Image (cartoon, rainbow, N blue to C red):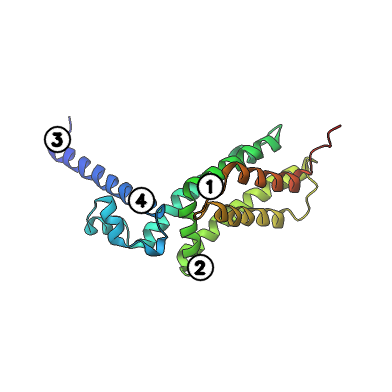
Amino acid sequence: MPNRQSDLQARRRANRRDARRRLLDAAHGLLEQRPWAEISLDDITSAAEVARTAFYRHFEDRQHLLMAMLDDVGLELDHVADDWMAESDDPVAELRRSLENLTSIFVEHGRLIQAISDTARHDPEIGALYQALADRLAAATARRIKADIDAGRSQVTEADEVARALTWMNERYLLDRFGQPPFGDPTAATTALITVWVNTLYGPPPARR
């Protein structure tokens, strides 16, 4: 059985993890109300009900907190198109589902991604992390396009450049619709993305008779 000391240490570790999660959740909630530039450290600690000293046990400053939030949303974005990236008998259907999932991520996290995008312009460290995320997404997309070209499913040329163009189109368009109010319609946004991606990669659907 655990002794009293080990039980106390376990509870302290759990409390620290809980405080970190509360800080991340508080920052995310505040971003639903106002831009990142208007959110102070005191705002975050007050919303999380965490002392400033506890904040500094987990994060160096507000930007370090934003980097942790970028890690979280970046993990979701890294895996949003897993089904399309894998070999599939119907890549168009998998691509449609992937774009639906992508739109859902921006509906949920668009204000956070907007804050990261804005901060990346003047913070070199966050800028490098954001660029690395975009590079990973573009590289994965390029690999999938090349596989479709090899299989005769796509007539795209310059797969790397097309992948980069589509990746950044997604980011700009979805931030325009969900980065700040007034928000767009998720169904319409998804339909627009599907139209661009499917027509670009696989050509228009056969004409109906």
Kind of element beneath mark 1: helix
> How many callouts does the rendering have?
4
Q: Which image quarter is the N terminus in?
A: top left
Q: Earlier in the sequence, mark 3 or mark 2?
A: 3
The percent position of residue 37, horizontal first and vertical second, equals 40, 64
What whole-number distance in Å separates the C-alpha atoms at marks 3 and 4?
32 Å
Q: Nearer the viewer, residue 159 or 169?
A: 169
**Residue that lies at the very extreme toward the right in this rendered image:** 209
Residues marked 3 and 4 touching at CB (< 8 Å): no
Residue 2 visible in rendering: yes
> Which residue type does callout 1 highlight?
Leu
Q: Quadrant of the C terminus?
A: top right
Residue at the far bottom: name it.
122
Mark number, residue 121: 2
Q: Do residues under tags 2 and 4 come within 8 Å of each other at their CB atoms?
A: no
**For numbered disc 3, what is the local secondary structure?**
loop
Lateral position of residue 5 relative to residue 16, left or right: left
Q: CA distance from mark 1 to mark 4?
A: 18 Å
Q: Nearer the viewer, mark 1 or mark 3?
A: 1
Q: Which residue is mark 1?
A: 77
**Residue of label 3:** 3
Counting from the top left corner in percent of width and height, residue 134 is at 57, 56
The residue lying toward the viewer, choosing from 141 and 2, is 141
